[in-house]
Image (cartoon, grey):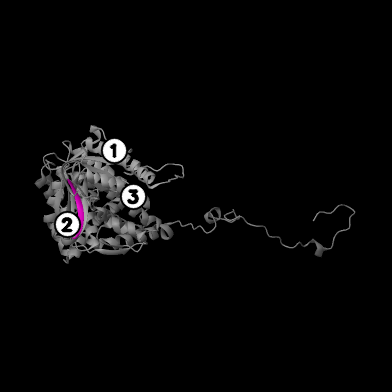
Amino acid sequence: LVTTRGARRAPSTACARAPTTMAKRPGAYTGGMGMSSMLKEGSKHFSGIEEATLKNIEACKQLAQTVRTSLGPNGMNKMVINHLEKLFVTSDSATILSELEVQHPAARLMVLSSKMQEEEIGDGTNLVVVIAGELLSKAEELLHMGLPCTEIIEGYTRSAEVVLKALDKQVVHTCDDLHDAEKVAYCIKTAIASKQHGLEDVIAPMIAKAAVSVMPPDAKGFNADNVRIAKILGGVSGATEVVQGMVMLRQPLGDVRRMEKAVIAVYGCPVDSTATETKGTVLIKSAEELMNYTKSEEGQMEAVIKAIADAGVNTLICGQTVGEIALHYLNKYGILVLKTPSKFEIRRLCRTLGANTLVRLEPPKPEDLGHCALVSEREIGATPCTVLDRGAEKGSNVATIVVRGSTQNILDDMERTIQDGVSVIKAMTADARFVPGGGAAEMAMATELQKFGAKQPGLDQYAIKKYSEAMEVIPRILAENAGFDATDIIANLYAA
C-alpha cells in the first residue's frame, strides 16, 4: 500500500486484499524446485541407483525370464494374443516380444536389440535377450557390493573384447562351398532343430535345395527374399517340395488351365474397356443401333487381345480387374489368365519370369515378355493353386517351398523356421565359420574370462568375473529345459 505525505492513512483492515487466482497454462513453470518442476505436468523423474538403475534392471530381468524357457530344441512354445485378438503359438523370441507391446523404456531397449538381431542375422534373438538379462542380473549383484557403475561398464567392455578373441579360436567347421546343397543343409540343421525339433532332417534339405537353386555365382549377392514360402493347410507337418518358380494360392480365371512353354505378359493396369473421365448420355433409337454400339466396344477389345496374342503371348498376368468381355476374347485366343492383386507379388513374378510390368493395355515388346517352362493348376490337399515352374534346366531367380500343416499356427511357426534357416544361409555368405553349440562355446569363453580376470589388479576384475558367470546361463538353461541337472552339466563342461 503506497500513501502520500499528508494523506490520511487507510485503516489496516482495508490493506488486506483478497487472494487472487490466475489461470495456469497446462505444463507451465510453477516456480517449484527440482527436476519435476521443469517438466510437463504429470511427468516423473527418477534418479540414483535405488530409484532408477535397479528398477530398470528388474524390468529387463523379468523380460528375459519370460523367454528363457523357450531357448533350445526342448524349449516350450508361448501362446500370445495381441491387441487384434490374433493367437501366436511360437518359441521365437522376436515374435513373442514384438507382440507383447512392452512399454517399459529399459525393457524396450532389449526388444529393439532382439529386433535388430532378427533383421541383421535372422536367428539368435532368444540368445540376445537371455544373455542381456543375465549380464544385468550380475551387474545388480555388483551394485549391491558397492561397485561404481563406471567400473562395471569398464569391466564388461574389456570382457567383450576378450570374448570376441576367444570366439575366433573356437571355430570347428567352415562351409567352403555354398553351391553344394548337402553341405549347406548340414550347416543349417541345428538352427532348424532349435525351432522344429524332429523335423530338421526333412526341412533343412528343402531349404538348402531352394537356396542353392537361386544362389548367384557370387554368393555374397544372395537375396533371402528369393526363397518364397507357400503355406497350404492340411497334411503332415513339413516341407513337401521345392518349386523352381512361384506358387500362387489362386486359380486361373479363364477356361485355359495349363500352358507349356509359356510366354507371359504382366500388366499392372486393368484388362478391360477404359471408362471415360466425363459422363455423357447416349440416345439409342433402335435395336440395330444398340447392337452396333456394343459391337464397336467388343470389336475394339478383340483387336487389343488379338494384337497381344499375335505378339506371341499365351499367358497373361494382371494386377487389377479383368473384364468379362476381355476374358471372353482371352479364352477365344487360348490365353491363360492369372490375377494377383498384390503389387509385391507382381514384382516377384517379374523377377521370377524375367518380365517387365506394362502400365498400358497394348501389345508387349519382346524385351518385356517373361518365359516359363510350365504354368499349371494343381490341387494340393483341398487348396487349388497355380504353379509357375521355370524348370531346372533354365534356372530361376525365385524358388518356392511348399509347406503343409494341420493348423494355421503350425504353418506360421513353420514359416518362421524356414525364414530363420534362409537367414542363416544369408549370414554364411558373409562368414561361413561355425563354433560348437550346446553351450560349449560359451563355456570356453567363460574359462578364458576367468583366466583374464585373475590377472587384473583393479576393481574391474569383479565385473570380469561376473561376466564369465553370465556366460554360463546358456548351457544352464539348455540343461534345465531338457530336464537335466544344470549344476552337474556345468561342472562336467568345466572339467572337459
**Quarter that holds the C terminus:** bottom left
In the displayed structure, 155 sits above or below 81; it is above
Residue on which disc 2 sits: 380
- The mark lying in front, picked from 3 and 2, is 2
Magenta residues, as a range? 382-388
Alpha carbons under labels 1 and 2: distance apart:
37 Å
Please name the amino acid that badge 1 sits on: Ala
* Percent of width and height locating residue 274: 37, 42
Q: Secondary structure at mark 1?
A: helix
Residue 179 falls inside the magenta stretch: no
Residue on which disc 1 sits: 303
Residue on which disc 3 sits: 153
**217 or 280: nearer the eye?**
280
Please name the amino acid that badge 2 sits on: Ile
Q: Marks 3 and 1: CB-CB under 8 Å? A: no
* Percent of width and height locating residue 219: 18, 38
* Percent of width and height locating residue 144: 35, 60
Residue at image x 37%, y 59%? 102
Q: Earlier in the sequence, mark 3 or mark 1?
A: 3
